Structure formats: C-alpha cells, structure tokens
Image: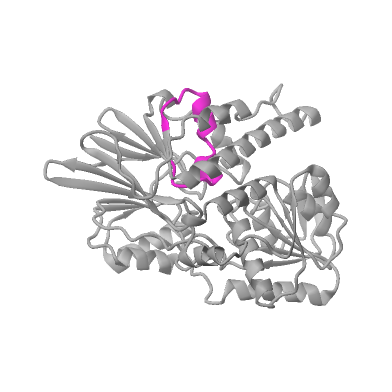
Amino acid sequence: MARLSFHGAAGTVTGSRHLLELDDRRFLLDCGLFQGSKDLRRRNWEQFPVDPASIEQVFLSHAHIDHSGYLPRLCKHGFRGTVRCTDATADLSAIMLRDSAHLQEEDARYANKRGFSKHRPALPLYTAADAENALRLFQPVHYGEDIHLGDDLRIKFKDAGHILGSAFLDLKRRRGRTSRKLLFSGDFGRPSQVLLADPVQVYDVDYLVLEATYGDRLHPETDPVEELATAIDEQVKRGTGVLVMPTFSVGRAQTLLHVLNRLEARGRIPVLPVFLDSPMAVAATEVFSRRIRDLDLLARKQSMAGTNLFQPGRLTLSSTREQSKAINRVEGPALILSASGMATGGRILHHLAARLPSPENTVLFLGYQAAGTRGRTLQEGRPVVKIHGEEIPVRARIKTISGFSGHGDQGELLAWLLAFNRAPERTFVVHAEPAAAAALAEKIHSTFGWEVTIPALGEGFDLDL
C-alpha cells in the first residue's frame, strides 16, 4: 500500500508538506511553514494530521522556510527520525531554522509586551531549543548519492537549480525485476540562472509532484541584469534617495551581490555604497563562499581566477541593530538589500517605514510577491501600507523586476516535461495559488495529454508504488 497526502502547498505557495505512506512506514517530503496572511499562518498551530513520532524520515528539497521551517515544531511534538537533504541545504537550514526560532520567540515577547495577543501569555510556535533539537537530526548527503531505505527502496537528490543545495527528490521502489518512481520537484529552478546549475533532466517517472508558482505566466524576455542596471542608473540620476530592495536572505541576496560585482567590473554601473542588512544573508553568503564547488561552471571559473564572487566594491555588511539603524541616516545614491523578500517581517520593514514616505526613493521588488504579503500590497499600488501598527504613506516609486525569480515559468516547466521519455501515470500540481495551478494543469493536459490533479489541502491519493 502506498498513499500520498498533501498537508501544505495545496491551494497556496507555502507550507510545503507531503506525507508518503509506504506499507507501515511514513516519510515526509518537505516540512515547511505557512507564510503570508493570518489565515495561512494559523495553520502552523494546528495539530499535524499524523503523530510526528510515527514519521521515520523527513526529506528536504531545500532550505527555504516554506519548505523547512516547520521542522522544529514537528520535533517539539515528537518527531525523532532523521532529516535527509544535501550538504548545502543542511548548512543553510542551520542558519534559517535558528533565525526562524529567534523570530518566533521575539514575536511572542513583543506580543506579551504590547498585550495584543488573545493568549496569556503568548507563546512562540517553537523555541531556539526546538530548532537545535531538529538540527541534530540532519544527515546530509551529496547530489546523486543513493540513500537505501531498505532492500527495495532508495532515494537520491538531484540538482533542481533553484537555490544552493536545492534538489528534486527521486524515490524509487523496486518490485521484482521492475521499479516504480515518485519524483518531487520541490521548487523548480530556471535554466541559465546566475550562479546555479540548470535543473537536472529526469526520466522514468511514474508519479510526479510538480510546483507551479509561475504556472500561469512567462518570465519577460528582457535581461533582468540590464533592468537592474537601468534601475540603478535612474536612481543615480535623481541625485538623492536610495534604492531599497526587499531581498530573500538565501539565494536572492547572493545573486544580487554577484550581479552588482559583475556590473561594477564591466563599468556598467558606478561603484555605490551597498548595504546588506540581514544577519541571515551575511551568514548565508559565507556558506555560498565555502561551497563554490556547488555553483555553476562559470562561477567556479571566475572564483579560480581570483574573483570574490559576492563582493561589490563598497559593500557594508550589517549584522547588529545599531548598524541597521545607522543605514536609515544614509543619503543616496545608495543600495539597501534587506530581508524579507516579500516584506512580511525582518529589518526591511524598518527601511520601508523610513523610505516609503519620500518620493526621492525607490523600492525595487525582484520577483514573486505572494497574496497577503506587504510586497503584494505595494505592488498593487496601495497608497498606504501598515508597518508595525502604523499607517505609512507610499510616496516612493515602486518597481518590479521578475526575471530574477528562482522559479521556472510555464514555458520552462513545459520544456523540462517535454524531455520525459514517457508520461507519468499521474501528475500532481502543488505550491501555487489556485489560478496558477489551474493554468499549468490545463496546459500540461492539453499539450501532453497527461492526467493532472490539483490536490486540496489534506487530500490523499493511493499510488501503485
């Protein structure tokens, strides 16, 4: 008996959690936090549908919090199995889970101080101790290494090209002289992405679980690096003000540092003050610098030639609160990179509160902004945004460049599927808002004739594995 049930990333882009039951064994594919609106975040507090102690192993596709951030909570409620992922994902997860636990504790302290929680006292979703307990369960492996889960079952991680360490989960079960395969895409990367290798092509897939974040759209044909250079030029020509970029700490921040480095080296942009204001991004950049061998061939070649891949000429790394506050006194032209990428929390909120009221400044988004986030609110052109309980007027320019997205678009997903040597018996489309999931499902069916299912939250399916 095999059954796959979807307890996250179903009807939404966050909370990736997929439970695979094989006979009397349970495995979890990803273990992410729900993010975004309050209704979504409430799901993190709900009891997990099965006893966490009954789960044998968790397999992580990558380190982003919407794929890994529920792990400490799972451990808090009894999970004692192993967590398998790539080496780079283990390194980045150590940074991200500790930071997430710190934020959970800080949020609870702030709620108790201000008295706005319904609970007395307000408690964190999990603590730093829970995060450490989770990290002790990690057993990382290399790309392509066979993990044997018994005589008839193995899993391996294949490069997904989304962020450093990201992977497809390739699970194969042998049945006599034949075998059956389940492939979970995690987050599907993009071909020719800066720093990263292309997503690996796979074959002989019987069941496919495919993300669809950009399932209803195509990335623009324009060059995002040139668009970024143009946005910087425009800000410099104004003479004053700063360019504020809400930035994901892991992946996007390092890509931007590298792109700025290369643009400066070419003389395409002036060497401006660049502030990376995110302790997590600073720590993640150190991981990227240690794991050059996991980057693409061009990045490795540049590193061998002596290039510091992540060092623009006037870079300032900001780790302490005092350093972060000092950035608010900086006059432009200058660039501020700060987390979070969708402006849901973190230091970027302080920079937005300080810079949004002035028309001299620009806020530049570099990718998808989920529904319910402040990033989406600003993209939609709202005249006011709420930050830390205050109504902040939006007078700064709001711009978006989507080409830096780490997610493959509809065309890139279809091109990858086109190389499959045969049709999967069933394809499940997940990790998308409803319109994007529906669009990709319809396109796959009309193009290839495959059977495609969009699972609802909590829905399960019997598989012939």
Name the spot of residue 282 as percent of width and height, x first.
67, 49
Q: Vertical placement of 394 versus 281: above or below?
A: below
Q: Residue at x 62, y 67 (%)?
A: 259
Q: Residue at x 46, y 53 (%)?
A: 187
Name the spot of residue 157 as percent of width and height, x first.
37, 48
Q: Which residues are magenta?
A: 60-82
Name the spot of residue 120 as percent of width and height, x first.
71, 21
Depth order, front residue of 275/350: 275
Outermost residue on the left side: it is 177
Observer able to see residue 177: yes
Q: How many marks?
A: 0
Quadrant of the drawing holding the C terminus: top left
Image quadrant in which you'd find residue 222:
bottom right
Observer able to see residue 464: no
Image quadrant in which you'd find residue 364:
bottom right
Q: Vertical placement of 211 versus 9: above or below?
A: below
Q: Is residue 119 left or right of residue 193?
A: right
Depth order, front residue of 10/407: 407
For residue 78: magenta?
A: yes
Depth order, front residue of 415/299: 299
Q: Residue at x 27, y 60 (%)?
A: 450
Quadrant of the drawing holding the N terminus: top left
Q: Vertical placement of 264 versus 327: above or below?
A: below
For residue 214: magenta?
A: no
Name the spot of residue 392 as percent of width and height, x first.
81, 53
